[in-house]
Every structure is written in C-alpha cells, then in structure tokens.
Image (cartoon, rainbow, N blue to C red):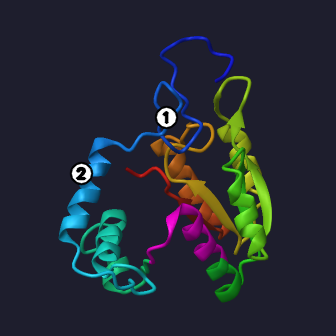
Amino acid sequence: FRADERPGKINLGIGVYKDETGKTPVLTSVKKAEQYLLENEITKNYLGIDGIPEFGRCTQELLFGKGSALINDKRARTAQTPGGTGALRVAADFLAKNTSVKRVWVSNPSWPNHKSVFNSAGLEVREYAYYDAENHTLDFDALINSLNEAQAGDVVLFHGCCHNPTGIDPTLEQWQTLAQLSVEKGWLPLFDFAYQG
C-alpha cells in the first residue's frame, strides 16, 4: 500500500475507514445514530449477559431464516459480545470448556488475532492453505488438501465474507464443496463474520 503512488488508492487491509489525511473521522451516519440513542435511551442499566434478546432473535433469523428448524427446535444460541475479538473468545472458551474440541484450523494468512484467541483458550491451532500469492487468488486445491487433514471433531474457522487480509472469498460452488467436505470428514465450521454489513 505504501509503495503505491496512485492518489486514489484505498487501504482495505485495516478494519477502519481513514480519510485522505490518515484520520479516522466519525461518519455523519454514526453521529446521527449516537444522537438518536442519546435522545431515546431510557436507562443506564447493564444488559443481561447474553445481550439484547430481540437483537439475538433477529440475528438468528437473519442467519438461518425466519421459521428455521434450528431456531424452532432451540438448537441455535446467540450471545452479544463486546466486539469481534470478544465473540471469538467466547466461542473459543465455549469450545474448550464444553466440547471435546481440541484443535482449530485457521487460514494462512488470517487475521493475526485468530491464533492467539484460540491458543489462549488452550486449543491447538493448525493452519490450512488459502492464498496463492503469485496469482493473487484463492488456492482452493491447496485449501482442500489442507482440510483433508482435519479430523472429525476439529473446528475449521472461516471468514464469512471479505477474507482478512486477502479480501478473497470462496465462490458459492466452493462453499458448497466445503460444506460437503465438513459433513464427510466430521469437522465443524465456525464463521468469523466481521464484515457482514
């Protein structure tokens, strides 16, 4: 990025917007939302440990579809967390303390915090191939070869969209192949959905 001399370049490698001066301004839409909250809040009380129940319900419906059997059978759970890293740590601790999971697979490259969050929970972290640096593409064959080593009961972490740091996502057909491989091999997919927007 620094070597690119074009004036209209945009740094997509960070998780915040910076203007042409390198500052991170508060966007007008954010100011309006904050003003709305300030004018309409009715309490300063703490949220419950799982967050706002209605937010959790809406999130489940967005992910699984309204009327989904996962929701109706109470097999889906939602917890509101303080940011993406907090959510990953809740997931890591849950896996380490409440399941037989011992190993989590993370893409190479990946967001640097992924490894430390899962390691800190006592889980072994392995890497699966992801990026073809020479061609600037997803190396799907290498990804599949790596994940063929994943064992039943392992967890494989995926970026839901806008893979960090490459920005390259699997196609619909590739996602379907990964879903089938998950079923065949018996590993559990876990999604970091930082950029769902």
- Residue tagged 2: 32
Of the image marks 2 and 1, the number of the one nearer the N terminus: 1
Magenta region includes residue 86: yes
Q: Name the residue under label 1.
A: 18
Q: Quadrant of residue 70?
A: bottom left
**Label 2 to label 1, Cα distance in Å?**
19 Å
Image quadrant where one finds the N terminus = top right
Q: Measured from the top left, where is residue 39 in percent x and y?
A: 19, 66
Give the vertical position of 81 relative to 180 (above or below).
below
Q: Nearer the viewer, residue 159 or 170?
A: 159
Residue 165 % position (x, y): 63, 40
Judge whether residue 35 is colored magenta.
no
Q: Which residue is drawn at 62% across and 81% down?
A: 94
Secondary structure of the residue carrying numbered label 1: loop
Residue span colored magenta: 79-92
Q: Position of residue 86 (x, y in %)?
A: 57, 69
Callout 2–callout 1 Cβ contact below 8 Å: no
100 or 95: which is nearer to us?
95
